[in-house]
Amino acid sequence: MTFSYYSLAPLNSVLNSIAALLLLAGFVFIRMRWVRAHRACMLSAFAVSALFFISYATYHYHVGDVRFQGQGAIRPVYFSILISHIILAAAIVPLALMTLWRALRGNFARHRKIARWTWPIWMYVSITGVVVYLLCYRLYPPGYKVTPPPSLTAQPMRHPPLTGMTAPVTKEAASEASHSTAPAISPGVPARPMGVSATMAETRSSGHAPVKPVSAMNPGAMTLAVMPRGASSRASA
């Protein structure tokens, strides 16, 4: 999953909508004298508006200005909403900070005086932010083209071979495999024979009779005796 700065535009609209709902809920709660609920809603609205400002600044820093594509009578309507939104958005920052500061310090008399101006301006900025998004991005889509991230245009990743499938064996690979599995022979030492001949060669070289397995011996015998060659004939004599 890749991130695109173009996705911040709808996020800004969502944040403005959440801020407007919190402002409306805070207004209703203070009318009902629910001070704690009112305080929680207004502080949450301030936090959401701060997140909106960060997202808005990040979006326009990376994307740039987005021109309105509407033509005709809708243009003066759009720009009147946009200009009033920008001016009041700049004015709401000190108003909201002062209103919250007076409320947190317990100066409710001065808080109510300034909140009468702060709340409607704040609500207007939040609602017009959603309206500007709908006009500029939904009803009249912008003219820029969203370029895919570099990771999406890169070469596709090569997948490993499926389990159970083997590649064809070449002559060179077969030759290397035969040389690698052959037993190593030291210089001056004869190669060790295989099978029965190997046992006979060991008997001639050591001068002892081959050791018989336990299953071929007398069941009552508990040990194996290795006798030199010719010792059995002397013993019987």
Image: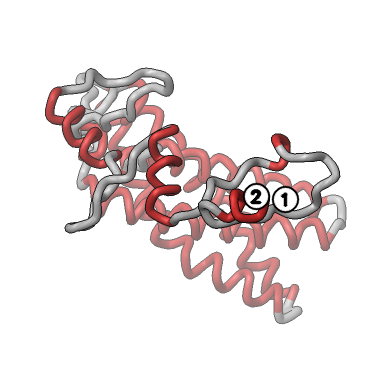
Q: Is residue 28 above or below residue 1?
A: below
Q: Please state which amino acid type lies under the numbered disc 1.
A: Phe
**Secondary structure found at label 1:** helix
Q: Which residue is label 1 attached to?
A: 27
Q: Residues within 10 Å of mark 2 (few under 14, many from 20)?
A: many
Q: Is residue 39 left or right of residue 89?
A: right
Residue 33 or residue 213, whichever sits in front: 213
Can the viewer see residue 179?
Answer: yes
Residue 165 or residue 150, whichever sits in front: 165
> In which quadrant of the rendered image does the N terminus lie?
top left
Separation of disc 1 and disc 2 at Cα? 6 Å
Q: Residue at x 55, y 40 (%)?
A: 17
Q: Quadrant of residue 152?
A: top left
**Secondary structure found at label 2:** helix
Q: Is residue 226 left or right of residue 205?
A: right
Residue 78 or residue 153, whichever sits in front: 153
Q: Is residue 225 above or below residue 138?
A: below
Residue 157 or residue 190, whichever sits in front: 190
